[in-house]
Image (cartoon, rainbow, N blue to C red):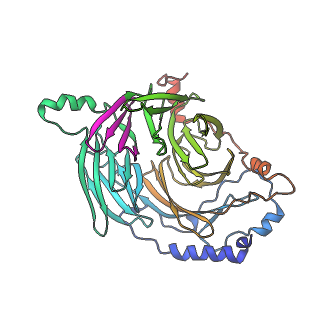
Amino acid sequence: MEYYSKRTLCSFIDEEKRAIQSPTHLPFKPHQQISDQDIHLSPSRPSTPSATMDSIIPPPCPDSPWTLSPLQTPSPSLLYHCIASLHRQDGTIYSITLSRGIVFTGSESSRIRAWRQPDCVERGCLRASIGDVRAILAYGNMLFSSHRDFKVRVWNVTASENFRAKKVTTLPRKRSFLMASRANSQQHKACVSCMAYYHAEGLLYTGSWDKTVKAWRISDGKCADSFLAHEDNVNAIVVNQEDGCVFTCSSDGSVKIWRRVYGQNSHTLTMTLKFQPSPVNAMALSSSLSSCFLYSGSSDGFINFWEKEKMSGRFNHGGFLQGHRFSVLCLVTIEKLLFSGSEDTTIRVWRREEGSCFHECLAVLDAHRGPVKCLAASLEIEKVVMGFIVYSVGLDQTFKVWRVKVLPDEKSLCLDGTNFRDSKMKIMEYEMSPVLSPSWVEKKLQGNHPFH
């Protein structure tokens, strides 16, 4: 517990302040100057503060740019700071992805911009003939992007001293005049909204608002399989890299699990997960040697999660995370943390307790002035605490970068003689229950949604 002493914590914070006190000038127009006023405190929640814990864990130094969060809980365990806030003038940013120290952003324009992590100095851009980049995905030197013409472009990116990008192919591949009809039959008929890449087999999965999912072999650019996945828009796809299992979610309110038929290219449905009659907008998978959790965020503000049984491989519903007041639009997992972005303009940071299904909300970041559309996160190597860089994009046309530090969890500590798990349960109580997204309610009342 020595690292919780005031002298050690403040010295750690001072080191971080010196590292970020000179913000980089970026080609984006600054949304606002970064100052202590930009640091937002998490909204307070009912808790039982302990005098003992208050004496052990002091607040940050008065001149520190960091925020200690949560504000009034007995075990403050997270520090966060917004290190950049950038405003884009030429359209909404729809998508974001990370690879090899580069952040890629896709927007309404025909340019995909590349930024260096974590200072976000622009490295270059990829110019496509068609814009409206709804989804992008990076793996190694490859970058996949979807466009307004419902096609997917594959790029080869070199992120050395001189940034270079070259388009490799378009999916479906361009064919001769005689083969054009066949190529059109392989193409999605509506917006390609999400993508996932299965590393072992070199398969790119694309989900579309035409309700279908397609699997593309990157080696030859051919469509290996195409199947009707849902009764409404496909909003997200996740692949388990351990076994190749494919997860899809949709506005029809369901999450489905698919497997490739052994020795074939076709896919078969193995499970349908459905607990609430509201659109599912986002998914994230947290997989390790000891556990596997699937998360889904929906328009009612809830985050449902399922745990995989080791013996049967089935996913059992473990519960839901309650806190967001409007739709959950994006999710990302890293280590034991889950970051969720919402239509309520906030980002919540959740931590799962080792060996259990219990989740603790560590912080609420008042991130944007509009819905948080997409998130990405990367790990920073730290000696004492876990460090993360989080990138958030909002429909307010802003792109923000956050540095997050997570202090270790005190598992063996008991508060006021009570069980530590029971104390955490009290912390998880919220002042207000989430409500349905206004936009979703409006569609429902107008009869434009299948759920009544």
Magenta part, dominant SS: strand
Q: Is residue 211 magenta?
A: yes
Q: Position of residue 409 (x, y in %)?
A: 70, 59
Q: Is 284 on the left or on the right of 58, as rendered?
A: left
**Which residue appears at 77% of the width and 50% of the height?**
421
Image quarter in which the C terminus is found: top right
**Which residue appears at 30% of the width and 49% of the height?**
109
Q: Is residue 73 above or below residue 197?
A: below
Q: Which residues are magenta?
A: 197-226
Q: Pick whichever, 160 or 261, lies toward us.
A: 261
Q: Residue furthest front?
A: 263
Q: Position of residue 404 (x, y in %)?
A: 57, 62
Q: Position of residue 279 (x, y in %)?
A: 52, 32
Image quarter in which the N terminus is found: bottom right
Answer yes or no: is residue 120 visible.
yes
Q: Residue furthest right?
A: 417
Q: Is residue 394 above or below residue 437?
A: below
Q: How many marks?
A: 0
Q: Is residue 47 above or below residue 247?
A: below
**Which residue appears at 53% of the width and 44% of the height?**
285
Q: Is residue 218 above or below residue 87?
A: above
Q: Residue furthest left?
A: 177
Answer yes or no: is residue 31 visible.
no
Asked where in the image residue 214 lies, by quadrant, the reply is top left
Q: Is residue 56 magenta?
A: no
Q: Position of residue 314 (x, y in %)?
A: 58, 34
